[in-house]
Amino acid sequence: MTALPLGMLPRGLTRDQAAEYCGCDTTAAFDEWVRKGIVPRAMAGTTRWDRKAIDRALDRRSGLLSDAAPSIDEWLAEHAG
Protein backbone atom coordinates (compact mmCIF):
# COMPACT_ATOMS: atom_id res chain seq x y z
CA MET A 1 0.00 0.00 0.00
CA THR A 2 1.27 3.47 -0.88
CA ALA A 3 1.18 6.25 1.69
CA LEU A 4 -0.72 9.36 0.68
CA PRO A 5 1.21 12.62 0.44
CA LEU A 6 1.31 14.63 3.67
CA GLY A 7 -1.94 16.52 4.12
CA MET A 8 -3.93 14.44 1.64
CA LEU A 9 -6.92 12.65 3.13
CA PRO A 10 -8.25 9.38 1.74
CA ARG A 11 -11.62 9.69 0.03
CA GLY A 12 -12.93 6.35 1.29
CA LEU A 13 -12.90 6.31 5.08
CA THR A 14 -13.17 3.36 7.43
CA ARG A 15 -15.84 3.55 10.13
CA ASP A 16 -13.25 4.63 12.70
CA GLN A 17 -11.81 7.27 10.35
CA ALA A 18 -15.28 8.56 9.44
CA ALA A 19 -16.22 8.85 13.12
CA GLU A 20 -13.03 10.76 13.86
CA TYR A 21 -13.46 12.93 10.75
CA CYS A 22 -16.95 13.91 11.95
CA GLY A 23 -15.66 14.71 15.41
CA CYS A 24 -17.61 11.94 17.10
CA ASP A 25 -16.04 10.76 20.34
CA THR A 26 -16.98 7.13 19.69
CA THR A 27 -17.96 4.93 16.77
CA ALA A 28 -21.26 4.36 18.60
CA ALA A 29 -21.93 8.11 18.39
CA PHE A 30 -21.08 8.01 14.68
CA ASP A 31 -23.41 5.03 14.20
CA GLU A 32 -26.16 7.11 15.81
CA TRP A 33 -25.49 9.95 13.35
CA VAL A 34 -25.81 7.43 10.51
CA ARG A 35 -29.03 6.02 12.00
CA LYS A 36 -30.48 9.53 12.33
CA GLY A 37 -29.49 10.40 8.74
CA ILE A 38 -27.09 13.15 9.78
CA VAL A 39 -24.40 11.48 7.68
CA PRO A 40 -24.86 8.88 4.93
CA ARG A 41 -24.34 5.15 5.28
CA ALA A 42 -21.25 3.44 3.91
CA MET A 43 -21.02 3.34 0.13
CA ALA A 44 -23.09 0.54 -1.36
CA GLY A 45 -21.24 -2.76 -1.33
CA THR A 46 -18.44 -1.45 0.89
CA THR A 47 -17.54 -0.71 4.48
CA ARG A 48 -16.18 2.71 3.51
CA TRP A 49 -17.70 6.16 3.86
CA ASP A 50 -17.21 8.76 1.14
CA ARG A 51 -15.54 11.79 2.72
CA LYS A 52 -17.14 14.16 0.19
CA ALA A 53 -20.61 12.72 0.86
CA ILE A 54 -20.04 13.28 4.58
CA ASP A 55 -18.96 16.87 3.87
CA ARG A 56 -22.04 17.49 1.74
CA ALA A 57 -24.38 16.00 4.35
CA LEU A 58 -22.85 18.11 7.12
CA ASP A 59 -22.87 21.24 4.91
CA ARG A 60 -26.56 20.65 4.21
CA ARG A 61 -27.31 19.96 7.88
CA SER A 62 -25.51 23.10 9.06
CA GLY A 63 -27.26 25.30 6.48
CA LEU A 64 -24.23 25.90 4.27
CA LEU A 65 -26.09 24.23 1.38
CA SER A 66 -29.68 25.14 0.68
CA ASP A 67 -30.03 22.29 -1.83
CA ALA A 68 -31.78 19.47 0.03
CA ALA A 69 -31.60 17.11 -2.95
CA PRO A 70 -28.78 14.55 -2.99
CA SER A 71 -25.95 14.92 -5.47
CA ILE A 72 -25.92 12.51 -8.41
CA ASP A 73 -23.07 10.60 -6.74
CA GLU A 74 -25.09 10.26 -3.53
CA TRP A 75 -28.19 9.17 -5.45
CA LEU A 76 -26.26 6.60 -7.48
CA ALA A 77 -24.52 5.25 -4.36
CA GLU A 78 -27.87 4.95 -2.61
CA HIS A 79 -29.57 3.19 -5.55
CA ALA A 80 -26.71 0.98 -6.77
CA GLY A 81 -27.25 -2.73 -7.02
Image (cartoon, rainbow, N blue to C red):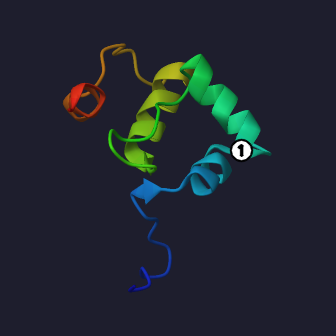
Q: Is residue 64 above or below residue 29?
A: above
Residue located beneath label 1 in the image? 27
Quadrant of image for the C terminus: top left
Measured from the top left, where is residue 69 in percent x and y?
Answer: 30, 15
Measured from the top left, where is residue 66 in percent x and y?
Answer: 39, 15
Residue at 49% across / 81% down in the picture? Answer: 6
Residue at 74% across / 35% down in the picture? Answer: 29
Residue at 42% across / 79% down in the picture? Answer: 4
Q: Is residue 41 above or below residue 62?
A: below
**Which residue is the extreme one toward the right?**
25
Residue at 33% across / 38% down in the picture? Answer: 44
Residue 11 appears left or right of 36 = left
Q: Secondary structure at mark 1?
A: helix
Residue 16 appears left or right of 43 = right
**Which residue is the extreme one toward the bottom?**
2
Q: Quadrant of residue 38?
A: top right
Q: Residue type at mark 1: give it.
A: Thr
